[in-house]
Each structure stands twice: as structure tokens, then as C-alpha cells.
Amino acid sequence: MSTPCATLAVWASSWLAGRAAPDDVIDALLQWAPLHIVVAGDRVSTGAVDPHWFAESDGTAAHLLRLVRSGTATSADFRLVLPVPGDVRGVPPGTPFAAAAAGAGQGVILSGTSEALGLVPAPEGAEALRWSVYGLAHAGTEPTYPPLGEAEFTLREATREAASALARLEFIDVTTGADVRPMIVETLADLSAFRYPASIPGRAARVLDAANEIDAILTVADRYGPVGAITAAQSDNREALLRPLRTAVREARLAAVQACVAETRRRT
């Protein structure tokens, strides 16, 4: 999984559909941080959820899951959002949740029968994630993403483009030398360490794996990009080379997570 919100959406939806054990969900969340603190993100959320959820947060992932299963979220639907400038699909506009999700670059919406909640994680020190909970009057319209077959094809094309981009990019001098391939392999191993439920569609798993492969290249390109004497034009050209790859990865992940959640919805 690429983000804590993707982990929560896929694993918690599988759990609520009876296809994953709560301990499995907790283990998946613990890969992100040993502590998970639940706090009220705004005044509205303390009205949408009983305030004791925030007062009694003990820093355990189990408490987060109890929140997910309580009240409006008992039979919740899940929506992953990964907002970026110019594309905030799936985010209810003009809400504190929208601002928080935009700042974090991620969020997850839990919609029940009458109300909805938005959760946004943020690092809290070195060992904790702080999950801010926002009350939403409605979940907004669920976006339509490309079918998984189309997303898989797009990623295959993007993989070839990423290989070409890698050959054209310049990297700063690093201790491992000019060959950045070992760093890409290491980064991919880190991304691949986050598990998926065994019950998700096979094509969704392939799409998530392919997105990780391209993301590993992008991460290394960002981390070891040229510094110092680089012109504005060179910087723009570099980003123009990478931007379509970032978009392909982001949309593929959204499509795959949406398909995973839809699969559990059909089997509930």
C-alpha cells in the first residue's frame, strides 16, 4: 500500500465484509506506525462522533478500528482520496476535511447510512500517526476511475516511459556511484513491504504492484535529483518528464483501491 489511507480503506473494508480478521487489519496498520492516535479534526466531528472516542484514544490501532465500526461507520463504505493541485476528485469541496486532505495529499472517507466521516493521517513524532476525524454532511459524489484493465495497460506504457526517463535524468553524485538501480530496487522493496488482503482481485494486486515499480523510480528521481546549478527551464523539463508518470501511478492506485472496496461491497 502506498499510504496509510489506502491501507485503512482496503483492509478495513475487507474486515467489515468478513473477509479479514481484525488482527490482520491491525498488523497492516502497524506497518505504518506502532501508535495510532485518534483526534477530533474540527468541531463538527465531535458532534458526528461521540466525544469519548477522542478522550479515550489510547494510541492503539484497535481503537481506530473501533471508531471505524462505531456509529455511522458500522456498515461504512470507504473512499480513498489522493488530492493534488488541479485534481481533487472525490473530496467534498469547501470542508475542513478537504483542506486537511489537500495538505496531507491523502484522506479516506467513511460513509454510513446518514452521515459520513473523513479521516486524515499525519506523523506525530517518530512513532505515531495522528488520525484527525472530520464530520461530513455528505460524502460527495464517488469519482469514476478507469477500469482495472485500462489502468493495467496504462501502467505498462508508463513503465516503458519511466525506463526512458531514467536514462535521460541526471542524478547527483551518491556514494553508490552513478548507477541508481540498486537504490530503485531498495525503494521498491520498501514499497512492497506493505501487504494486501488475500481476498482482493488479482488484477487490482497487479496494478498496485506495477504502480509501486514506477513509484520507486519517481522516488529515487526526486531524492537524488540534481541540486545547485540547475536552471528553471531544466527543472521544468524534468518535471514535465515525470508528471505523466506521477499521474498514472496516482490514478492507477485510486482505481485499484476503488475496485478492492467495490469487491467487498458486492460480497457483503
Image (cartoon, helix red, strand yellow):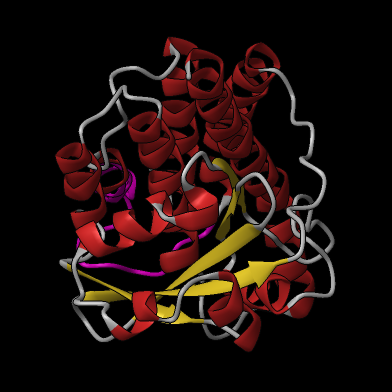
Report the number of discs. 0
In the drawing, does residue 67 fall left or right of residue 250? left
Q: Is residue 85 magenta?
A: no
Q: Is residue 66 visible?
A: yes
* Picture quadrant where residue 47 is located: bottom right
211 in relation to 82, above or below: above
28 in relation to 209, above or below: below
Q: Which residues are magenta?
A: 170-187
Closest to the observer: 18 or 258?
A: 18
Residue 21 % position (x, y): 20, 32
The residue sitting at 26% across, 28% down in the picture is 20
Closest to the observer: 28 or 54?
A: 54
235 in relation to 124, above or below: above
Residue 176 % position (x, y): 20, 59
* Picture quadrant where residue 247 is located: top right
Residue 53 % position (x, y): 36, 74
The residue sitting at 79% across, 61% down in the picture is 92
Residue 162 % position (x, y): 56, 37
123 in relation to 246, above or below: below
- Please name the predominant secondary structure of the magenta segment in the image: loop
In the drawing, does residue 29 fall left or right of residue 224? left
Closest to the observer: 166 or 128?
A: 128
Q: Is residue 179 magenta?
A: yes
Q: Looking at the figure, which quarter contains the N terminus?
A: top left
In the drawing, does residue 61 fall left or right of residue 163? left
Q: Is residue 101 visible?
A: no
